[in-house]
Image (spheres, coloured by chain):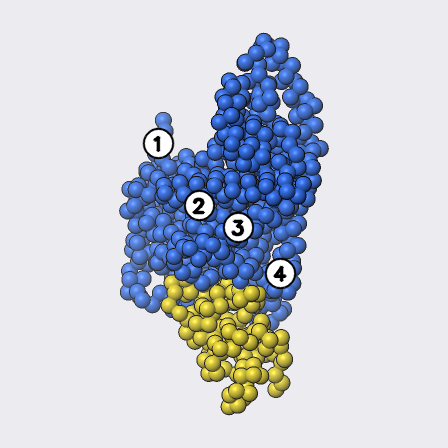
Chain colours: A blue, B yellow
């Protein structure tokens, strides 16, 4: 019998304190974690066992205060008051957790407040604000390893006494303190809330900061070792600052970005060239061909399976031997950047430059995420606090940021002629992004709020966490990326074998051949590209194209409409007219730029 | 007592010079490595939880290029603050020693303009 948990526990705390790590450890789920503020922009619910009872745990976006300064923080406040969970569950929960979130709509029964051992004052302030909601609270004092390293000793039993609630020391990434945390949570849920802390806070309302400062000071013992009274920053801290300075930070940023690009392309290409392609072309595909030829008579069905677009051939080779290596290499590189805390540093460094195109430094994070997949990138813009900025970044992502599947396709398409072309395409996409930013900055109303962003500590990424992350992305890719891709190839096979494709080619000839100078069958990627971004490029691989045609095809594919899933995300995050406008903008720009390239190119070549 | 000569003086041209009215020191006036005590901050909900509260010691870790943000250190945390916001973070003192070796003082140009500053 499946029971719905009767208790809902909210997991709250300041941004980047490790709530999601804690959540993953407690529920066994895999929500994304990174070393910067604003990774979690929606809530996710999961179940955890506390002894015999099962409770549903909700991972809430991090908040510095409960004053809700951006959309992500507003979600947190709404959830705490338990009022609009049901109405918002459609737009804020992710995937299969929707059901759980709706069960939770009756309001939370307790809060697990995560405190940052490195910033006790601010964490306590947030805790006080949470206490005002009159719910039973357990506090987890997380990131103790980092505090320890700096010589801080925090008296948790003192805090627990003063606050009148259990305070459990934890190190979430290492899984320390979880048994204690679970038993504290269980006893709080059984006993209900203890009234003492709430009463005290009410008396002191308006004096929360002095109270937080006083409490933090009393609980904290600083032990600087033989360094005396002054805290000596370690090597990590020193580099953390150096990377932010113009010298050596800016040249290093250039080197790091170039290395990242090289790593993604190089690692992906060698995985494909030396491991996956030989296996696929030498073993798997001939095996399938033989098997199918033995069972199915030549004709329509056989062609569907193993013909030109046969989905047992291309449908397996494209997602698994062509795109997957880049999924692996990209998410490995991204995980390194994310977990080290380098991304916000890059944002701080480039803020001055990005200001010129209507962005702030913090916008670099969703943009980079967009090179993986546009959907999480557009969701990540929720952490930004102006609609104008969200729109500018979303437009850039839809227009000129190829998702990893498309990048893989582009690299495969162009690198056969020259790797330089790949670089040219990417540089061209940067230029278009800058132009779009410049234009939109002037066109859209609304001021750009000045930057306020916490720069997290520079950390050495943990190998186990990296491995888990890459594995999770790979799983996600197989489920959400590869399977639809197989479907799209099957559709292509159907269109091709049934003759619809030839008909489409004739209909679209003025555009495809006349304006873009591509062969007639290039109408296919344009039709399929509406469904999936990489399908706007992949079929070109099978055509014998000239260098100019290759380039025009790649440019059109790059700027062409984002996939159907992004269009749906746009409609949900903004509205239908923005989604429609984006489709119109991207397709018209793709054809315009492609046509111009063809004309200019054929003039020179 | 010797004033340490810093590259920071070069940064104190154009916009910064305008914002550094003597007697009204703000965060954008400090050069890399200098520190001071916060006197007042603009009314923004994000400021107090980031540690930017009156009475806190703040140090400028880095100044962004191309008019980029000031990276301030408060309570051993690094915060990136846009220049215009940094200018609104007023600091205590002007021209007096805050910590060993580091000095908060107006640029030579400002001293020439306001001789009483020394």
Q: Earlier in the sequence, mark 2 or mark 4?
A: 4
* Residue on which the image places disc 2: A379
Residue at 49 percent across and 51 percent down: it is: A436
Q: Is residue A450 above or below residue A109?
A: below
* Residue on which the image places disc 3: A433
Badge 4 vs badge 3, beta-carbon distance below 8 Å: no
Q: Earlier in the sequence, mark 4 or mark 3?
A: 4
Q: A431 or B116, which lies in front?
A: A431
Position in image of residue A291 (x %, y %): 62, 14
Chain ID of residue with mark 4: A
Q: Is residue A582 above or below residue A348?
A: above
Residue at 40 percent across and 40 percent down: it is: A580
- Disc 3 secondary structure class: helix
Q: Earlier in the sequence, mark 3 or mark 2?
A: 2
Q: Earlier in the sequence, mark 2 or mark 1?
A: 1
Residue at 61 percent across and 64 percent down: it is: A246
- Disc 4 secondary structure class: helix
* Residue on which the image places disc 1: A3
- Do marks 4 and 3 share a subunit? yes
Q: Please identify the quadrant where the C terminus of chain B is shown.
A: bottom right
Whole-number angstrom distance, CA of label 3 to CA of label 1: 50 Å
Whole-number angstrom distance, CA of label 2 to CA of label 4: 28 Å
Whole-number angstrom distance, CA of label 1 to CA of label 4: 55 Å
Q: Earlier in the sequence, mark 3 or mark 1?
A: 1
- Disc 1 secondary structure class: loop
- Do marks 1 and 4 share a subunit? yes
- Do marks 2 and 1 share a subunit? yes
* Residue on which the image places disc 4: A250
């Amino acid at each position: 019998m499946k029971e719905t948990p009767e208790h809902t526990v909210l997991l709250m705390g300041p941004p980047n304190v490790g709530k999601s790590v804690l959540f993953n450890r407690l529920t066994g789920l895999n929500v994304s974690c990174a070393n910067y503020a604003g990774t979690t922009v929606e809530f996710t619910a999961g179940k955890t066992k506390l002894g015999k009872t099962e409770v549903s745990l909700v991972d809430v976006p991090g908040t510095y205060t409960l004053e809700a300064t951006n959309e992500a923080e507003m979600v947190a406040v709404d959830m705490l008051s338990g009022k609009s969970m049901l109405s918002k569950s459609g737009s804020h929960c992710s995937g299969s957790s929707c059901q759980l979130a709706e069960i939770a709509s009756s309001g939370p029964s307790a809060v697990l407040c995560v405190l940052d051992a490195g910033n006790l004052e601010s964490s306590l302030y947030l805790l006080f604000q949470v206490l005002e909601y009159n719910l039973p609270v357990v506090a987890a004092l997380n990131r103790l390893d980092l505090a320890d390293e700096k010589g801080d000793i925090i008296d948790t039993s003192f805090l627990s006494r003063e606050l009148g609630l259990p305070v459990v020391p934890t190190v979430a990434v290492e899984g320390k303190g979880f048994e204690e945390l679970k038993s504290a949570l269980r006893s709080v849920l059984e006993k209900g809330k203890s009234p003492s802390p709430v009463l005290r806070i009410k008396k002191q309302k308006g004096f929360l900061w002095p109270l937080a400062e006083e409490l933090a000071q009393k609980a904290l013992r600083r032990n600087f070792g033989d360094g005396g009274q002054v805290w000596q920053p370690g090597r990590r801290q020193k580099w953390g600052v150096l990377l932010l300075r113009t010298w050596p930070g800016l040249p290093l940023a250039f080197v790091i970005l170039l290395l990242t690009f090289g790593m993604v392309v190089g690692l992906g290409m060698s995985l494909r060239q030396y491991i996956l392609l030989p296996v696929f072309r030498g073993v798997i595909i001939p095996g399938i061909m033989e098997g199918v030829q033995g069972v199915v008579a030549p004709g329509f069905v056989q062609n569907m399976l193993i013909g030109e677009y046969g989905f047992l051939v291309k449908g397996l080779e494209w997602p698994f031997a062509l795109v997957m290596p880049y999924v692996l290499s990209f998410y490995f590189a991204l995980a390194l950047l994310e977990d080290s805390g380098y991304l916000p540093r890059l944002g701080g460094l480039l803020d001055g430059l990005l200001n010129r195109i209507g962005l702030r430094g913090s916008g670099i994070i969703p943009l980079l995420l967009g090179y993986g997949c546009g959907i999480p990138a557009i969701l990540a813009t929720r952490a930004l606090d102006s609609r104008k900025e969200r729109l500018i970044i979303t437009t850039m992502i839809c227009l000129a940021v190829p998702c990893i599947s498309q990048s893989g396709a582009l690299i495969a398409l162009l690198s056969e002629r020259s790797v330089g072309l790949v670089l040219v395409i990417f540089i061209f996409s940067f230029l278009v992004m800058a132009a779009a930013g410049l234009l939109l900055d002037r066109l859209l109303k609304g001021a750009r709020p000045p930057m306020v962003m916490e720069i997290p500590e520079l950390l050495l990424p943990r190998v186990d966490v990296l491995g888990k992350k890459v594995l999770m992305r790979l799983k996600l890719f197989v489920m959400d990326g590869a399977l639809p891709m197989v479907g799209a190839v099957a559709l292509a096979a159907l269109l091709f074998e049934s003759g619809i494709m030839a008909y489409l080619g004739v209909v679209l000839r003025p555009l495809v051949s006349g304006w873009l100078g591509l062969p007639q069958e290039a109408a296919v990627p344009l039709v399929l590209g509406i469904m999936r971004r990489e399908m706007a490029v992949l079929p070109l691989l099978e055509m014998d194209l000239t260098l100019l045609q290759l380039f025009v095809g790649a440019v059109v594919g790059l700027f062409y409409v984002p996939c159907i899933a992004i269009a749906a995300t746009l409609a949900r995050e903004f509205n239908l007219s923005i989604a429609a406008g984006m489709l119109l903008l991207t397709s018209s720009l793709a054809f315009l730029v492609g046509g111009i390239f063809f004309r200019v190119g054929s003039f020179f070549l | 007592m010797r004033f340490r000569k810093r590259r920071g003086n070069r940064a104190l041209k154009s916009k910064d010079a305008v914002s550094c009215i003597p007697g009204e020191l703000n965060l954008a006036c400090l050069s890399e490595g200098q520190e001071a005590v916060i006197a007042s901050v603009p009314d923004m909900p994000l400021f107090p939880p980031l540690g930017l509260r009156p009475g806190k010691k703040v140090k400028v870790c880095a100044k962004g290029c191309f008019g980029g943000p000031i990276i301030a250190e408060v309570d051993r945390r690094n915060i990136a603050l846009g220049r215009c916001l940094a200018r609104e973070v007023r600091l205590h003192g002007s021209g007096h020693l805050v910590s060993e070796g580091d000095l908060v003082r107006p640029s030579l140009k400002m001293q020439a303009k306001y001789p009483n500053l020394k």
